[in-house]
Amino acid sequence: MIYLITGGERSGKSSYAQNLALQLSDTPIYVATARKWDDDFQNRIDRHQQERDERWTNIEKEKHLSEIDFSEKVALID
């Protein structure tokens, strides 16, 4: 099953998606695809990282997501 969560910038999409992923799995994967453009964006990245605890497997991969094995896993791609 695939969920697509859309909305405006800073509208709570990531928090909503993280909560949903944790409802679906005790050990979800977080795939961070963003490029760090400037200090403001780095602050947003830092905030998002602080929201995730040890239950998450974090993968930073801007491109080539097909190289990740998503089999039988819940993944949040942001």
Image (cartoon, helix red, strand yellow):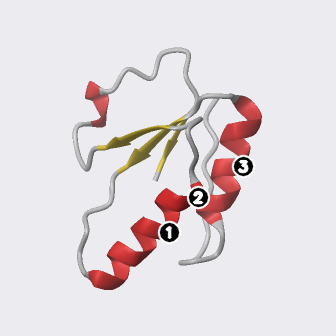
Q: Residue furthest right?
A: 23
Q: How many marks?
A: 3
Q: Amino acid at mark 2?
A: Glu
SS at circle 3: helix
Q: Which numbered marker is on residue 29? A: none
Q: How far separated are the C-alphas under marks 3 and 1?
A: 16 Å
The residue where tag 1 is placed is 47
Compared across the picture, whether 17 is left or right of 68 comes to right
- Name above or below for residue 8 compared with residue 23: below
Residue at position x 47%, y 58% in the image: 49
Residue at position x 58%, y 46% in the image: 53
Q: Amino acid at mark 3?
A: Asn
Q: Amino acid at mark 1?
A: Arg
Which one is in front, 5 or 10?
10
Mark 2 Cα-neighbour bin, 10 Å: few <14, some 14–19, many ≥20: few
Choose mark 3 or mark 1, whichever is in front: 1
The picture quadrant where one finds residue 70 is: top left
SS at circle 2: helix
Labels 1 & 2 near each other (Cβ < 8 A):
yes
**Of label 3 and label 1, which has the lower sequence position?**
3
SS at circle 1: helix
Mark 3 Cα-neighbour bin, 10 Å: few <14, some 14–19, many ≥20: few
The residue where tag 3 is placed is 19
Q: How far separated are the C-alphas under marks 1 and 2?
A: 7 Å
Q: Which numbered marker is on residue 51? A: 2
The picture quadrant where one finds residue 1 is: top right
Q: How far separated are the C-alphas under marks 2 and 3?
A: 10 Å
